[in-house]
Image (tube, rainbow, N blue to C red):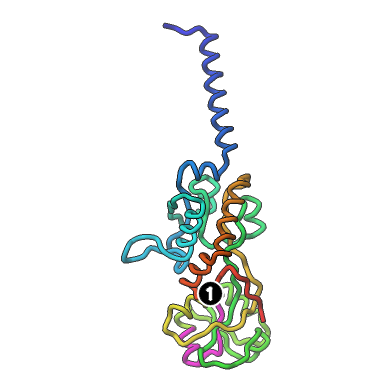
Amino acid sequence: MKLSKYVRNALAAGTMAFAGLAMASAHAAGLLDTVKARGTLIVGMEGTYPPFNFVDTKTQQLDGFDVDVAKLIAHKLGVKVQFVKTEWSGILAGLESGKFDVIINQVGITPERQKTFDFSVPYVASSPQLILRKDDNSQYKSFADLKGKKLGVSQGSNYEAMAKAQPGVVVKSYPGAPEYLSDLVGKRVDAALNDQLMTAYLVKTSNIPIKGGAIVGDPKFNGIPFKKGNPKFEAAINKALQDSFKDGEFAKISTKWFGIDVSKVRKAG
């Protein structure tokens, strides 16, 4: 039976109205309601950035500091967690396109990124830190104390550029941490420079006789980005983090990987 033009137009208008209503309802629901209804928080991460996130060779499962943080947050939200491995070069674009709900992968909170995404409260604060021999009692409190001294850094890193900007410091560049740490222990350099978190991880996990020295730069803060316009989700994820700071669960995870609470700011001495 043929439908009249009037009926066809009425049905089409009704279909469009229903689709529009569904879209409006989904938008009104917001990210928190979507996550709760799904029962899963979808998390984007690299999976190639130890100790923050990596694939365990024995279990073939994702592991690391950020993995534990993601599981903790999902638990506090009352949902499960699902990880989506994505290369760093495309991870922010993946979030923008809705490939996942959040990124938990050491994303720095910057004004440029805040134009596109909202962020949780910071859960990691890290600064440049000197690395010293364990038996070194030198009082290196700043770059000024290293004038005329040799400082080991990774070639091409931000820390190499920072070190080279310091007057009087003799900078020695190496392919990576293993090489400059070897020279540090062998007393061929007086100190080394790296990120505070990596320093803590190296001190905790390696058998090399080293220790963390003075903080020598301003802290940078990392948070969890998500799409703008989700105030209920923002409040919920911030509460999950802040509760974990208070109840000690976050500190437990942090100490497991770094031996310190990485949510706490450590300032230059």
Give the magenta range: 181-194
Q: Residue at x 57, y 53 (%)?
A: 237
Q: Residue at x 56, y 86 (%)?
A: 191
Dot 1 lies on which element? loop
Say few, some or many: other residues with alpha carbon within 10 Å of mark 1 (under 14 / 14 to 19 / 20 or more). some
Depicted 25 relative to depicted 40: above or below: above
Quarter of the rendering occupied by the C terminus: bottom right
Which of the 4 image quarters holds residue 264?
Answer: bottom right
Q: Residue at x 60, y 87 (%)?
A: 170
Residue sitting farthest toward the left:
58
| Place of residue 197 in the rendered image (x, y in percent of width and height, measured from the top left) | 53, 73
Residue closest to the eye, 253 or 248: 248
Residue 182 within the magenta-colored segment of the rendering: yes
Does residue 176 appear to the left or right of 162 in the view shown?
left
Does residue 146 appear to the left or right of 187 in the view shown?
right
Residue closest to the eye, 96 or 14: 14
Depicted 168 relative to depicted 128: above or below: below
Residue 166 within the magenta-colored segment of the rendering: no
| Place of residue 114 in the rendered image (x, y in percent of width and height, measured from the top left) | 64, 54
Question: Disc 1 residue type?
Answer: Ile
| Place of residue 8 in the rendered image (x, y in percent of width and height, measured from the top left) | 51, 12
Residue sitting farthest toward the front:
247
Which of the 4 image quarters holds residue 67?
Answer: bottom left
Residue closest to the eye, 213 or 238: 238
Which of the 4 image quarters holds residue 126?
Answer: bottom right
Quarter of the rendering occupied by the N terminus: top left
Q: Residue at x 48, y 75 (%)?
A: 201
Depicted 149 relative to depicted 53: above or below: below
Residue closest to the eye, 86 or 268: 268
Q: Which residue is mark 1?
A: 260
Depicted 223 relative to depicted 153: above or below: above
